[in-house]
Amino acid sequence: MTDDRYTRVLAIETSCDETSAAVLRGRGDDVAVESLVILSQDVHRVFGGVVPEMASRAHVAALVPVVEQALSDARVQHASLDAVAVTFAPGLVGALLVGVSFAKALAWSIGRPLVAVHHMEGHLFATSLEHRDAVPPFTALLISGGHTMLLDVAAWGRYRLLGRTRDDAAGEAFDKVAKLLGLAYPGGPHVERLAASANAPSSLRFTRPMLRRDQTPADDDYYDVSFSGLKTAVRSAVRGEIDRGTMTDDTRASIARAFQEALVETLVEKTVRASTQFGRRRIVLGGGVACNGALVAALRARAARSDTEVFAPSARLATDNAAMIARAGLFRFEAGERAPLSLNAYASMPLPGIASTN
Ligand code: KG4
Ligand code: ZN
């Protein structure tokens, strides 16, 4: 049964290596996730990274049962859906196309509108599904495997891009460092665990990239980050230990910890710069790296000094999932947006609603 006061959205997410579907019902910020199914593709572990062609094939095999499971968990039929939302960018084009083609066919066959969702806008909405106060205005730090973005969010749909990575994304840096340390993919959680096992204190310290005390908002690297130099520093440290024959479990843990500390301090400082400059009292994290407990704890401690609250999603909603796509899809649907059946998938695409800083 459809309730006129609410909109019920079925969403599909296939941008990388999770096949996910969710049903969400709501109006504005008053929403309820009725179901969420996430199938993580294990196959990529063997290769130490996502293999695009394999991801597409795995989405093809999994999507129909994942969507059926989401509908059955929510106890709804096609007839009670009001819209079909789908991630159309950014991501792996082949993987995205599986979700987009399926969503188009479904929307057409049940006679419901199709809504195109930008994956990073999904991450922006994810935390609000768990924390009622994680709503604009706020400073957002989106840190995933493919993106690192610092945003000022005046309202849903009104974003100002303050900074981003000049090279590797935060999650990518974790994954590359994990590889250097001989850890499995995806590397973030393994690096975090190894770092936590380090015997403090260690004299090892990596330079904080693009972080200087004398920076001012007029500098173009005031908010931007860069992690490729940090990764290179980790590589030299690892090689040095191996060459000297001094690599032990303790040394690996110290390197993991020193890497994480450098990355965390950089992100924390840049994020707090943004909340201070824009007078925001809330910071919202999104993306897989938002699972990192050391980052969340350091940001909370630093933000508390300026009475600013930090909202972080649980692991389930931090990593890729269709509930966040449904929530962003509801927002776009309520704004009157409808996608044509000619909708395509795109590897990259600017976040909608971005205003320039100047
Ligand atoms: O958002 P996400 O699921 O996928 C993308 O859209 O990219 O993020 C995945 C990334 C991976 O790079 C993974 O290593 C990282 O999130 N990650 C973490 C942690 N858990 C996941 N990074 C650091 N610490 C963690 N605990
Ligand atoms: Zn993501």
Image (cartoon, grey):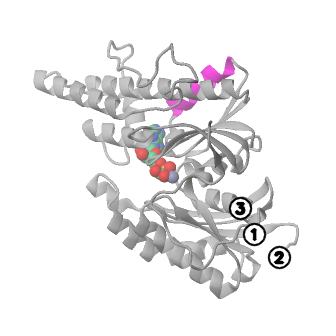
Residue 225 on the magenta segment: no
Q: Earlier in the sequence, mark 2 or mark 1?
A: 2
Q: Is mark 2 within 8 Å of ligand 2?
A: no
The three-letter code of the residue at mark 2 reads Thr
Kindly check if marks 2 and 1 are in contact, taking CB atoms under 8 A apart as contact. yes
Label 3, on which residue?
332
Q: In this view, does 229 lie above or below 290?
A: above
Residue 210 appears in the rendering? yes
Q: Which residue in the rendered view is the most extreme toward the front?
A: 358
Instruction: Give the Cα separation between the discs numbered 2 and 1.
Output: 8 Å
Q: Name the residue under label 1.
A: 8
**Quarter of the view holding residue 137:** top right
Give whichever of 60, 350 is nearer the camera: 350
Task: Name which residue type carries label 1.
Answer: Arg
Disc on res. 53: none
Which residue is under mark 2?
A: 2
